[in-house]
Amino acid sequence: MTTPDTRRPRPASDILRTALRRNRGAMIWGTVLMGLYQAGETAFPIALGLIVEHTMRDRSLGSLGLSIAALAVIITTVSLSWRFGMRILQKANTTEAHRWRVKVAACGLQPVARDVDLKSGEILTIATEDADQTADIIEVVPLLISSLVAVVVAAVALGLADIRLGLLVIVGTAAIMSVLSVLSKRIGSSTQEQQARVARAGAKVADLITGLRPLHGFGGNHAAFRSYRKVSTEAKLQAVTVAKVNGAYAGTALALNAVLAGAVTLTAGWLAFDGQINIGELVMAVGLAQFIMEPLRLFSEMPKYVMIARASAERMALVLTAPPVTTPGSEHPAAGGNLEIDCVRHGTLRDLKFTVAAGEFVAIAAYQPRAAADLAAVLAANVPPDAYEGAVRVGGQELGELSVEAVRAHMLVNPYDGEIFAGTLRTNIDPSGTSRTVPEAVEASMLTDVVALHRDGLDYGVRDRGANLSGGQRQRLSLARALAADSEILVLHDPTTAVDAVTEQLIARNVAKLRRGRTTVVITSSPALLDVADRVLVLDEGVVTAEDTHRNLLADDADYCLAVAR
């Protein structure tokens, strides 16, 4: 086991800089096109002012036709630049959000490598909403620059008509940004708190759904509902607070922008009345005063989105920069090796020691369910190797020397409560679409009746968590997935607790036949699975107390007979 990484965690600002650096090409093109769009929008009232001036002065049909053609070019430029600019930016935004989702999910899928005090529901919120809001920085920066371009062009155009109009726009914009910068900081902190409370509510509801059946069993469902209602209410109140702050920000920005536009219009009218600017310049000034409200709105809203992106990046940093508990190794186990448990002490396990030879089918009858769960957690690498005493060796190499990916590719531990995902039966059995043993896995797990029951067969739609399947069907679907993986070493934890005795007998025989020559460990109290095993290990009080075939143990061990006989 290598020394844990002690480098300084990257702050949220580094996450934002990484997102900007990775998408600089798309952002440059997006900025150019959006700047062209804003420049075209600004040129429209300027062109109208020039048309009015030249038409009144020259009264020429040729000049009028040329002006109309110029307006057509401006309108076409505005339309195309907006269309392609936003397409480039939104594609980059979506791609970057996906990258961060994958990165956060990768950290969540390696629990032994990260010390994160967050529940799965919270990590899910970070991987979705926070990843999306962080990636929004890719659109924010080009829009901020392009709206600034529009304000500058408008200020220059007005300044050419009269310097006082240009200065009014520049000073007014600076004043508006100064006022709104204060509100944007409040929005950032409020949004971060809202995301945290929403994440806690999501984690609470995930726990509630998972444990709803046992909660009903002992009458704890009402207390659990009250607990969720409290967390949900806190999230709602914080969302209302954020909405109020956003409303105050938007209202203040709109009011200040309107005041500036009105000031420009009134000043231009006064200058025209006084004869200091001509009619064409007045038309241009009034048009720009109306137009400038939109880029000013964008320009004034961008700091808010920057603060929201930063707040979300800080939440992602909780996962991405969490200090590692242990750093997995980089070795790969040899094919066809043994599985060796050498004096392991963890939880209820006490100096547990046994070896499963390559190609052997071994069943473990655990008298205490907690011991079975502890053993499954250790084998699944859900417990860091330095968190327990002793050693687990796969192919002669200790688990701590192997990478997590290598362990999972070589040894699959299928939990008794395997997750069922929204999709189809096929995608649940073979998520990667690369398995060559799907038909055999379906038959061995006795999932054939579920496939035959529906017209779509393996393409039958499955709801999230298998909501449209019975408990036995979900368990057989999980078993089919484990068998279809065809791993070197397969560990099954109570794979038949939700099926009837006849189906259990058939599954036991099918699994033994399908896994012949492959290393298989079944942690179970099922007589059918115990009977087809090459040998049975009795796990009592954290140690192996007996070892023989199932039938010999039934004949010679009264405690074993009492524990497993049905």
Image (cartoon, rainbow, N blue to C red):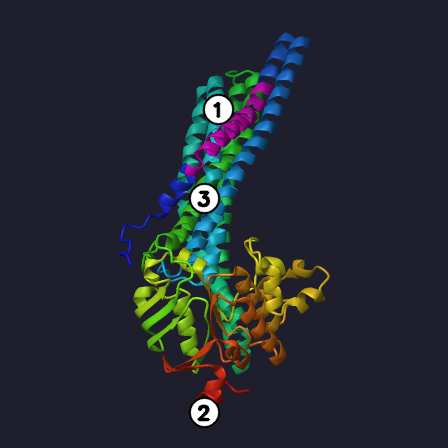
| Kind of residue at badge 2 | Ala
User: Disc 2 on helix, strand or loop?
Assistant: helix
Mark 3 crowdedness (10 Å alpha carbons): few <14, some 14-19, many ≥20: many
Q: In this view, does 330 lie above or below 396?
A: above
The residue lying at 61 percent from left, 9 percent from top is 57
Determine whether 465 is above or below 73 in the image.
below
For disc 3, the marked residue is 304
Circles 3 and 1 in contact, beta carbons < 8 Å: no
Using the image, tell me which numbered label, if any, was put on residue 153: 1
Name the residue at 45% across, 44% down. Answer: 304
Q: Position of residue 342 (x, y in %)?
A: 32, 71
Looking at the rendered image, the quarter that the C terminus falls into is: bottom right
Q: What element carries label 1?
A: helix
Q: What stretch of residues is rendered in magenta?
A: 22-48
Alpha-carbon span between mark 3 and mark 1: 24 Å
Nearest the eye: 376 or 74? 376
Q: How far apart are marks 2 and 1 (CA)?
A: 93 Å
| Dot 1 crowding, Cα within 10 Å, few <14, some 14–19, many 20+ | some
